[in-house]
Image (cartoon, rainbow, N blue to C red):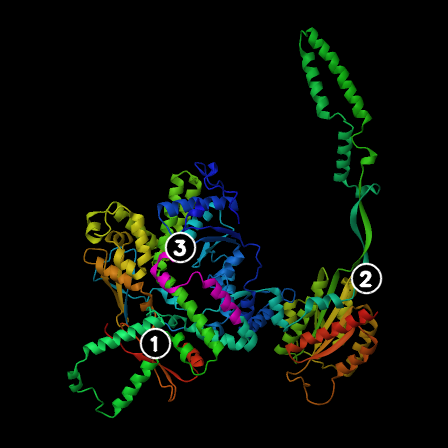
Amino acid sequence: MTAERGAGGMAQFIDRRLNPRDKSLGNRQRFLRRTRAEVRRAVDKAVAERTIADAANGGAVSIPTDGIGEPQFHLSRDSGERERVLPGNKDFVAGDRIEKPKGGGGSGRQASDSGGGEDPFSFALSESEFLDILFEDLELPDLVKASLKDVSQREFRRAGYTNDGATPNLAVLRTMRASMSRRLALRRPTAAGVERLEAELAALRAETEPGVADQLRIAELYAEIERLKRLQRAIPFIDPIDVRYNRFTPTIVPRAKAVMFCLMDVSASMGEREKDLAKRFFILLHLFLKRKYARVDIVFIRHTHEAAEVDEQEFFYGRGTGGTAVSSALKTMIAVRDKRYPAADWNVYCAQASDGDNSASDTQDSVRLLREAILPQTQYYAYIEIADEDGGQRYGGGGDKDLWRGYAQLKPAAPNFALARVAGRDDIYPVLRELFARQARKGAAQ
Amino acid sequence: MTRADLAPNAPSTRGGLLFDGAEWDFAAVRRVYEAIERVGCDELGLDVFPNQVEIISAEQMLDAYCSVGMPLMYAHWSYGKRFVRDEALYRRGYQALAYEIVINSNPCISYCMEENTMAMQTLVIAHAAFGHNHFFKNNYLFQQWTDPAGILDYLDFAKRYVASCEERHGLEPVETTLDAAHSLMGQGVFRYRRAAKLKLGDYERRLRERQEREAQDYCDLWRTVPSGAPTRENSISEEEARERKRRLRLPEENLLYFLEKNSPTLRSWQRELLRIVRNLAQYFYPQRQTKLMNEGCATFVHYTIVNRLYEKGLISEGALMEILHSHANVVAQFDFDDPNYGGINPYALGFAMMQDIKRICVSPTAEDREWFPDIAGRQDWPAVLRDVWANYRDESFVRQFLSPHLMRKFRLFALSDKASESSYRVEAIHDDEGYRRVRSSLADSYDVGAGEPDIQVVDVDLLGDRELVLGHTSRKGVGLAETGREATLRHVRRLWGYDVRLEDAPTAPAS
């Protein structure tokens, strides 16, 4: 009937909910590409404000509207004359005059409709977009999978049920389930059933003048109750064959905890830029570790000529004065590690950032500490030297700095030691990639 | 989709409720659709394109939002911008999503959100699939300017074309061209209908007729009348300029069209991009001129239909209440001094005017008979409304049909705002002296053309310095806003390839 209705024709009902999602992805990427400079600035700001642990969580960023305006010709709102009609007149009559509001014409709401307002444009970045901008095109996840070395330990994992085991592992639910199915199969009388008969019996016996039928019934009940109770005794509520235990099997699992030591020189020569680079380096290392380990602790140790464990705020923003003694930081790190992070339970990672100025004698001490006490018990030790913006050395010419020269000696013997120079933020990711990629190749060769 | 399982007159849909409870399913949606169709087409006489109702998720609704409501769209960063903004607003709960989006296409596609309750789906189908659909199909502006059967194919072409341009010429050049074209969308429409192109036969016939008439009208006396021969030197260049403008058909109000046809520097793919943007602007132009009527029509239709469904016992009181609750929210009109005031709500005024027309048809007062002698007391209000929906746009609709009754109900008053004065003046209110002024003033405000800058291509010397001269004709002394003016002009220069000058003509020619 409806089909005959020429106008209406056939109606179609289509479920589009399963259509591919992210239809806007391409446009979103175009938008981000266009605003890359502004978004990068916003991301930088976010990184400066955030802690290392949640630096890479994505989230809201605000950018100025300059680059993303869509200009058009508009009529100006403050010239000429116009007339408009409004609803809700209360007591105006023709000829009344109404003062214009101060500071611009028109009703406020309409004034902002014209676009081109100065409010910053804010929107949310996903984690991967955020990281992508933070570290310029990184291929983090695959690299992490391939590169971090597994340190395994034995752990008992649940593996179903078993018929024998220790009492603490009793699986109560399973046991009761088995018990119930056995009782049902063997038709064990229920307690409720017996009680009902006993109640009936008690009621009959309470009668003062029982009739013949009642008497017969009483005898019957006695016999029945007796039979049921015998059955109950014969069929136990829980039989040893019902009992089940949780089964655990030992499995080899990678050690799930890691600690990351961040060591930084905070003497006066480390300025804003140097610290920002160091922070990015730490963030990236933390990201690597977070993707791999269930739990990552971060320990911040800063040093001048003496070292102290500090919180993150103090680490990045506290000001220290004094000379430079790298070995002090290494000693503190060893102390903290031995006290709180025994190498048997923890994967130890260490990242050190410095501008590379250190006294010759202290460098010797540091190298010795590294070789003897730190590197053998450390998964990975990365040292970055923050170079000048142009990539050159701070005081021109003169070859490598002292600390670098000293550390370089360690390298041939220690595959888990890496050192690199970083001059700008673009260098950071390649540095880590190189470090990890090298390890990955080694891992594959073994 | 097969409807074999649904005999339209099955007992289940006669007498009993069409649905119960909030959950919807496709069978219920179909039952409701058919009941609505019966009321809409048989009782209201609606004439609609075949409907295609699509159920989408909130995420897909967001997608649809930022591609200007179209199911497919070419790629451009500005749509991504809209998406990230709407997404942020939606996720933080600042902005709810629309219940539906409807597209002026044949078949007419309407999107319904999966979150809607069954009652809401009923409302949405009546509103979009019948109300808007009827309006799209029958209103003269849509009939003249849009091609609903071809729009989806055209968008598909546009999308593929833009993608192939990006592939061949790179993302950036395409983006630059589209940016510039988008900035001129407001000046990229034809506001007046051109004469249809003549077929060759007609052309020859007309030529012959003209020659015949000239032969008939020939009078030797005319030869003796002195012709307007150039008397001064500079009028030769004036003559040239006139000739030049005539050849380029200047002045031209459609900037995108002019640039597409005449820009000395654009490559052919860029011209095609301009054409795409221009066609889209033209496609949406009728919608901008009929917002009030379109929503008024759809709201009136859904209101009338759901009430009929309730009267026929097809939907429960609870469902009706839920629908009326949403309806009341949609048609709320705040007073001008209310903090929530955001202009005149097109749903509110549109719906009220449709209801008012029905009232005038059915039970007119003496005032109505005086103001609306043509329709007062005509009784067959569906026919009157169908005629209104077909033959008016917002501006003419208000001018013709806003009644004193409604002006009093909305307590409308007209306020004049002169930039030179420090106060507004109440020009007219809802009383006998003011009705006509208020009505015509309100009608003017719905004239889309008048709310936009009137910028036309005035002159260009293609053989000289090629500077393009645009003229802005201001009305009532309203000038161009500084914001965006230079940036937009830069876009025009990019498309034209040579210098562009924007002149402010002080006043509109008396018309």
Give the residue displayed 76% in from the left and 33% down from the top: A181
Q: Which mark is residue B132?
A: 3
Please identify the quarter of the rendering in which residue B291 is found.
Answer: bottom left
Q: Chain of mark 3?
A: B
Q: Secondary structure at mark 3?
A: helix
Number of residues whose C-alpha sits closer than 10 Å to that of mark 2, classed few (under 14), some (14–19) or many (20 or more): few
Give the residue displayed 52% in from the left and 65% down from the top: A123
**Secondary structure mostly seen in the magenta stretch:** helix
The residue under label 2 is: A344
Instruction: Choose between B151 and B60: the one closer to the eye.
Output: B151
Q: Nearer the viewer, mark 1 or mark 2?
A: 1
Q: Which mark is residue B252?
A: 1
- From mark 1 to mark 2, how far is it between C-alphas? 82 Å
Number of residues whose C-alpha sits closer than 10 Å to that of mark 3, classed few (under 14), some (14–19) or many (20 or more): many
Q: Chain of mark 2?
A: A
Instruction: Choose between B164 and A404: the one closer to the eye.
Output: B164
Q: Secondary structure at mark 1?
A: loop
Please say if A155 is above or below A370: above
Q: Is residue A65 left or right of residue B394?
A: right
Q: Chain of mark 1?
A: B
Residue segment shown in magenta? B134-162
Along the polypeptide, which appears first: circle 1 or circle 3? 3
